[in-house]
Image (cartoon, grey):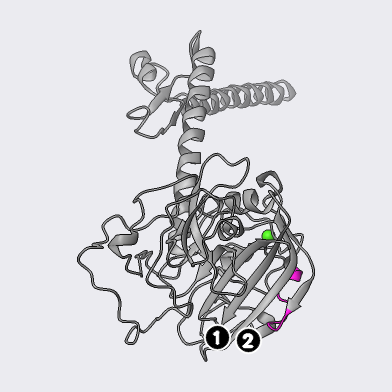
Amino acid sequence: MKAFIWTLSVLFFLLMGIGHCRGGQFKIKKITQRRYPRATDGKEEAKKCSYTFLVPEQKITGPICVNTKGQDAGTIKDMITRMDLENLKDVLSRQKREIDVLQLVVDVDGNIVNEVVPQHIPNSHQSTPGLLGGNEIQRDPGYPRDVMPPPDLATSPTKSPFKIPPVTFINEGPFKDCQHAKEAGHSVSGIYMIKPENSNGPMQLWCENSLDPGGWTVIQKRTDGSVNFFRNWENYKKGFGNIDGEYWLGLQNIYMLSNQDNYKLLIELEDWSDKKVYAEYSSFRLEPESEFYRLRLGTYQGNAGDSMMWHNGKQFTTLDRDKDMYAGNCAHFHKGGWWYNACAHSNLNGVWYRGGHYRSKYQDGIFWAEYRGGSYSLRAVQMMIKPID
Ligand SMILES: [Ca+2]
């Protein structure tokens, strides 16, 4: 009996052992199938990719498949990977630049970039069309000067507070600045050819001689909102606008001018009740582009209040080059380019709003905080420089 029970026990363990082995083989088979489901089909395997890069169509059309199996797969994969990464980086950086430009356009709050020549230029004083020198300030080449009558200032809703038309163009020069031109006998306000010392070429700009004693070189002017000032770094560097209307002379030009001699700065502001005030700074110059045109100002005097000294020693900031003292980008909120601190007591390159007090999400008007506050947009502004007497 004992022998029988012992035999049964042996048979039972043998059967369990066989069953376990069969189960193990089955499990291994199942795992194998899951990992290599088409291991038996060699041709089909060769067609498949371990992974796929999708590259832009400009460079390579269609997806690139890389088979990581095979003798040279590693080398080929590395080569294609490097090539694709270079292509992708190239395309991404180009797209980023395009996005930045589009962002600039979008952030103008729907304002349409609309640059027109606001003033008629008499035929007798017509300037040479096209660009002169290293700035991009230009007139509208399609402006029909021989056909259009002079603007009726009495009915003009945005008449110039500076009463500048008709425009005079001085053919002589170039002069080193407007003071130089005045000393050469030219005492009228108008368009002059100016070439600062050490600059590459002459530029056209507006010389203001109506203010006693004249000789002022205008570096910035706002009068009627005809020019969009929400621009990128390159625009602010080179300059933009219309010489006989609103313009920004360009940081590089202002830098060249303000470093050839000792200059002072005069800012004239006009509100919507025809009141004019001014702020004058005893010295003015910009540092070079390598210092992002850092502002250097002397002491203030005037009746506008000092809204500029807070910006003294600050670098220039645009939407695409943030050099301000604020965590975000001040140009984004104030919609201009300026020597923003964190952020602005003055914003003379902001949005031109009609009527003074304006409604906006941010304080983005043309304001001088110490004069009418940040929520009042001035009607006209002029920034001018002149050698210290
Ligand atoms: Ca910032």
Kindly identify which residue carries mark 2: 372
Q: Residues within 10 Å of mark 1 (few under 14, many from 20)?
A: many
Q: Nearer the viewer, residue 370 or 260?
A: 260
What are the residue bounds of the magenta stretch? 302-310
Q: What residue is at 48 percent from the left and 77 percent from the top?
A: 162
The reply to whether the residue tagged 1 has its Cβ within 8 angstroms of ligand 1 is no
In the image, residue 305 above or below residue 255: below
- Verify whether residue 140 appears in magenta: no
**Farthest top residue in view:** 71
The image position of residue 295, as x and y in percent, is 71, 58
Q: Which residue matches tag 1?
A: 271
Q: Position of residue 260 (x, y in %)?
A: 68, 48
> What separation in Å lies between label 1 and label 2 (alpha carbons)?
8 Å
State the residue at coordinates (28%, 74%).
Answer: 150
Classify 210 as above or below 126: below
Q: Quadrant of ligand 1?
A: bottom right
Q: Nearer the viewer, residue 65 or 223?
A: 223
Q: Locate residue 52 relative to residue 143 in the image: left or right.
A: right
Q: Nearer the viewer, residue 14 or 146?
A: 146
CB under 8 Å between discs 1 and 2: yes
Label whose residue precedes the other's in the sequence (1 or 2): 1
